[in-house]
Image: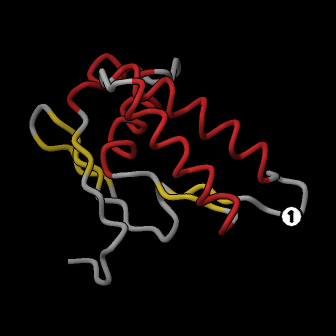
Amino acid sequence: MIELLMSSIVVTHILQGVGHMESRNNGVLGGEELIEQAEAFLRLCYRELGKSEAELSDRSKAVREEIRRCGTYCHTAEELAHGAKMAWRHNSRCIGRLFWHTLEVIDARGAETAS
């Protein structure tokens, strides 16, 4: 569900797996490909957020280990929020994308009920 509230948009999407990238053995996305995509996202995200190289290195290492161990990884709340803003900003077909910086993301991945 997406609600428009005054000048900001609040995303209250409750879905299992939102902000969660998964490696699949059926040829869709292999572990090494997922690692490459995750690291590319992290480099761009952390650069835009003004994070240090040390922070990027530490997070990349943790993501690689999590993917190799579990075949998947979860975005931090900050990565999820900034990734949603990046996606909106880069959507050339969206007339409202000029307001990408006003997007307010509510991380409801841990929610068990709609309320």
Residue 40 vs 3, above or below: the answer is above
Residue 56 vs 98, above or below: the answer is below
| Number of callouts | 1
Residue 70 vs 77, above or below: the answer is below
Residue 115 visible here: yes
Query: Could you tell me which residue is drawn at 33 percent across and 73 percent down?
Result: 110
Crowding at mark 1 (Cα within 10 Å: few <14, some 14-19, many 20+): few
Query: Could you tell me which residue is drawn at 42 percent across and 24 percent down?
Result: 53
105 or 65, which lies in front? 65
Indicate the position of residue 105 as horizontal and vertical percent values.
27, 47
Indicate the position of residue 81 as horizontal and vertical percent values.
33, 42
Q: Secondary structure at mark 1?
A: loop
Q: Is 55 placed left or right of 23 in the picture?
A: left
What is the quadrant of residue 113 in the picture? Answer: bottom left
Q: Amino acid at mark 1?
A: Asn
Indicate the position of residue 41 as horizontal and vertical percent values.
54, 32
Query: Could you tell me which residue is drawn at 73 percent across and 58 percent down?
Result: 23
What is the quadrant of residue 83 in the picture? Answer: top left
